[in-house]
Image: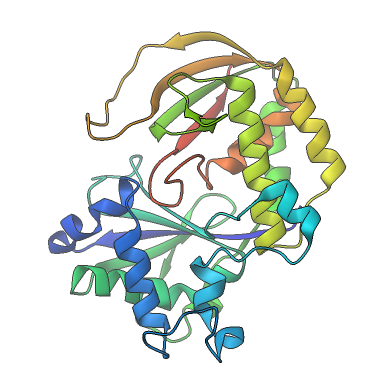
Amino acid sequence: MDLNLIRLHITLAPQAVQAVAPLLGGKGAGFEEALHAVCCVQKNQSCLICPIAGSCAVPSLFSRQLSHDPELVRRYQKPGLPFTFYADSNKGDRNSLLVLNLLGRACGHLSLFLDALNQLAGQDVCLGLSASDYQNSLVHIDHTSTETVDNLPVLAAADLLALYSHRFSCCERIRLDLLSPLRLIREGRELTRLEPHYFIRSLLRRISSLAVYYGGGVDQELFRHLAQRAASVSLVRQLPVTQTFGNHLRGVNGSFELAGPFDELGPLLVLGEQLHLGKGAAFGMGNFAISAVD
């Protein structure tokens, strides 16, 4: 599997928290407009007919361009966005810590994302910036330096999967915690409860789609095999809900214990933590955590 990832932690200025809050609740239109504004030099011009579209960052970051390969279009439809925003609830005040994961070609455009956040908030939002390495330690980044992009720790998905694999040796049970509401559509309707096999198959499709569109692709036979293995995953029990997200956010929430072949599926599920799932996945929704159950 060939896909690069950068995981950034942004300490927000207190006065910027309210402006950035919609990014954590599935509402990304304002940010996409701000990103377009800081990227685009041909104002009021459609990307479809823009003469410099081939060299512009806008199409690669959020236009979700379809592949020219009809088989890929049939298999994956329109790609997701190459980034995810969410609050880091494990480190301090979740209202002032914003996590931004950049995928593939988006890894080279950190300055545009920071500029767009500033545009959205109407002020400088970043008090501090750090990035996770392979050991999940935080490396301080000088966001004011023009050399920042050259110093970012870029993580390879294949290496992350190798690191995660030891956690799931002979693993037959996992705990799934939904950290923000999950909105999955199946056969035209939004699910109101967790369907484990559909959750896993949808996540495998999302991972492989992002790798195909923004990386070097995946082993299709392996992913077909894993999708088949997902059919044997079952729900053991639903655990007591420990957090709520407010009535204004729709979707499935809660914690669940699942049984299945997680020696194979577990590492991909942990990788999926960085990518989220379902509607609004790029903007705070469908955030989850996986842990092996002894």
- Most extreme residue toward the top is 237
- Most extreme residue toward the right is 221
Q: Residue at x 32, y 48 (%)?
A: 24
**Closest to the observer: 16 or 19?**
19
Q: Is residue 274 above or below residue 293?
A: below
Q: Residue at x 12, y 62 (%)?
A: 15
Locate residue 204, reporting x and y percent: 67, 39
- Residue 261 appears in the picture as rendered: no
- Residue 126 appears in the picture as rendered: yes
* Left or right: 170 in relation to 138: right
**Closest to the observer: 69 or 233?**
69
Locate residue 113, reporting x and y percent: 40, 71
Locate residue 42, reporting x and y percent: 42, 90
Q: Residue 13 lies in what quarter of the image?
A: bottom left
Q: Residue at x 48, y 84 (%)?
A: 147
Q: Is residue 27 above or below residue 105?
A: above
* Left or right: 162 in relation to 146: right
Q: Is residue 57 above or below residue 208?
A: below
Locate residue 150, reporting x and y percent: 55, 79
Image quarter where the C terminus lies is top right
Looking at the picture, the colour scheme in use is rainbow
Q: Residue 233 lies in what quarter of the image?
A: top right
Give the number of callouts: 0
Q: Residue 239 lies in what quarter of the image?
A: top left
